[in-house]
Amino acid sequence: MSNETLTRNTKHLLHALFQSGVRHFVVSPGSRSTPIALLLAAFARENTAIKLYIDVDERSAGFFGLGIAKMCQTPVVLLGTSGTAIVEYAAAVAEAHVSHIPLIVLSTDRPAELQGNGAPQTLPQHRVFGELTQQFLSFNLQDDHPDTTAYIDFMVQKSVHAARTDRRGPMQINLPLRKPLMPDLAAREPITVAPLTFHAPTPHFDTQHLTQQRVVILAGPNEGASYQAALSQFSQAYAVPVIADVLSRARTPETIYGIDALLQAGLVTEAYRPDLVIRFGATPVSARVLQWLRQANIPVWHVDTHAGTDHSRHISQAILQSPMDFLSSHTVTNHQAFYDLWQALNERARHIQGEAALPYHLDQIVAENTPIFVANSMAIRDMDDIFTGQTTQEIYANRGANGIDGVISTAMGMSSTTKQRSLLITGDLTLFHDMNGLMMARKYQLPIDILVVDNNGGAIFSFLPQAAEPDYFELLFGTPLDLDMAKVAQLYELPYVVLSAASELKTVLANQVAGPRLIVFQSNRQNNVADHQQLLGEHHE
């Protein structure tokens, strides 16, 4: 074993990752990861295409990397030290698995002789994420054999390609290392990685004409490339109504919005019944829309590269094709009157007040193409019901596992990828759950406005049956934290603004600042329920 071998193989690992399209690295420092971290820092200093971020909290780092990968649609590396540090990535890996996001965990490890024998900071890290990672590799970087180096070059490129294409999702590369851990930073041996090139033949699809004349498209959350322009062209050319989920990145004022509220209010009657619904993307934010399709026994084709994922078990055809390819290879002759009937739903008056007024005002005032990250629970539901996409379709969330874990850090990762000012909408409980993520906003002075709906607890539970149990509700579900948001802002050195009304957002956002800013809207959970019951007035069930 020599430092020369460790240095050479580590450089090959990093160059192979770069050759595979990796440009973003998020490092949580530790002892066992020393040689990888040092050589990565040196590589980044020599290559300005590499973006290196340091996040001392592995849980936050995992979601920070996830946010970058969501925005850039490219693999992102997480580097951590051995022991529980690696396990802290698990929540982000789980979200990446369900959402098909190519996260790459470089887990540095203790060598074999220290495993299972009482060595400190040592866990069984081999495939530690189980079925959550589609690809797993293990390299002995200190093995001085030419086959080892060639194997690193080849397998990294092969596995990263798989993680971003046919088996899209997270992967783990485990790196057991013996001391001494210091690489030779002065080594100047040129590193050449033989490129492994993948060619995918361009698919050709014969144009097919759909015989149905009352076709509706349901554009669900989009995990891949944007197809908004093609969808708009298809809708207008063939008079096809489009119900666009707020996470489809295809919602515009011409698409149907707020389907959940419309269904709950009983406004989607038999007259709106389609002959066929073509569903794109992942599971919609609206639970009611899938219930409606199943209960009304409406035929559904699911078109997606991961088609067939449908917990309602109602789709009749799973078409393994991208939405873009489907739209370019199909035509339909829809009834214009049917299209006009659906479009008129957007004209229904909505009585918007309280928390729900935040997405309404944002819809009017945010700058063009503003990236907006939305927390789960109430925030994403309000955005889906109210935000029409007048100026931006760049709406993101962690809807794979539908949890509140890592929301702040993911939004910070999103913000790090663009110079344009971005926005996060979150509740106070979600903010608290990942408050460490605010450190990245401060450290890198990220251009993001953090809009916190402070209703002192978990507002979504007030809409659920357990709200009828007042003896236990606040203790177990309301969970008030009594956070002082001014002190949170002070801790992370963030400019701090309190809104007395949602309409004040226009004035606040017009007053631009250079880095992050905390904006607080104080709300009441009980009033929020009443406000939502009046959203569609007398039509509400």
Image (spheres, rainbow, N blue to C red):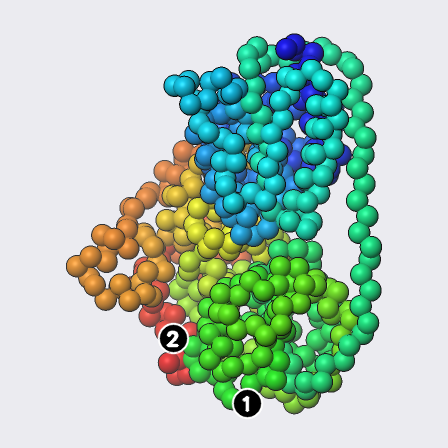
Residue holding disc 1: 271
| Residue drawn 56% across the image and 85% down it | 273
Dot 2 amino acid type: Gln
Residue holding disc 2: 534
| Residue drawn 58% across the image and 25% down it | 175
Q: Secondary structure at mark 2?
A: loop
Callout 1 environment at 10 Å: few (<14), some (14 to 19), or many (20+)? few
- x, y percent for residue 174: 57, 29
Please determine whether, in this image, residue 209 is positioned above or below residue 30.
below
- x, y percent for residue 55: 52, 31
Dot 1 amino acid type: Ala
In the foreground, 129 or 448: 129
In the foreground, 281 or 132: 132
Q: Residue furthest left?
A: 471
Mark 2–mark 1 distance (CA, rounded to whole Å) = 24 Å
Callout 2 environment at 10 Å: few (<14), some (14 to 19), or many (20+)? some
Q: Secondary structure at mark 1?
A: helix
